[in-house]
Amino acid sequence: MPTLLIVHHTPSPHCQAMFEAVVSGATAPEIEGVQVVRRAALSATASDVLAADGCLLGTPANLGYMSGALKHFFDQVYYPCLDATRGRPFGCYVHGGNDVTGALRAIDAITTGLGWRRAAEPVAVTGEPSKADIEACWELGATVAAGLME
């Protein structure tokens, strides 16, 4: 059974709402035969990534960059996963107070270095997530998970 790993840093109610929507999309009834594993960014390991067939990444944008927790995750898994995970699909969502550009750029740089393949456009939200933003997070989770269905 293919596995989707959701790695997230969820320190705020807005990030929590986005995370819950992503999980809801990834575990929707029409998504069959995909195991969804959720890990906080500070506890996700290279073993988690190696056991997964795809990843969804969630982070707040802090001071124009991804959270330190997601950066720590990448620091821990980069070299152990570098060759073994090339071509793996991924998606991401980012929440910020006013700008998420730097966080998205950093995620793109690291995932490009890992050789991961973007399976869906990122969901980027500033301020309070709207109904459309939450729906986009649901679609992100469903799209990445559906891409793993056998």
Image (cartoon, rainbow, N blue to C red):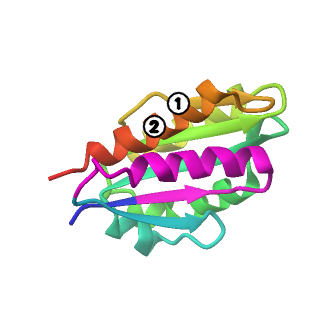
How far apart marks 1 and 2 lie (CA) works out to 6 Å
Which quarter of the rendering shows the N terminus? bottom left
Residue drawn at point x = 71 percent, y = 59 percent = 69
Q: Secondary structure at mark 2?
A: helix
Q: Is residue 132 left or right of residue 86?
A: right
Q: What span is in magenta? A: 5-32
Q: Secondary structure at mark 1?
A: helix
Q: Position of residue 20 (x, y in %)?
A: 59, 52
Amino acid beneath label 2: Leu
Q: Which image quadrant for residue 147?
A: top left
Q: Residue furthest left?
A: 150
- Tag 1 near tag 2, CB within 8 Å: yes
Residue 32 position (above or below residue 49): above
Q: Using the rendered image of the protein, determine whether residue 38 is visible from the camera's viewpoint.
A: yes
The residue at which mark 2 appears reads as 140
- Graded by Cα atoms within 10 Å as few (under 14), some (14 to 19) or many (20 or more), the crowding at tag 2 reads many
Q: Is 15 contained in the magenta span?
A: yes
For the point 74% across and 50% down, the residue is 67
Q: Quadrant of residue 21?
A: top right
Q: Amino acid at mark 1?
A: Ala
Residue 136: which disc? Answer: 1
Q: Nearer the viewer, residue 117 or 37?
A: 37
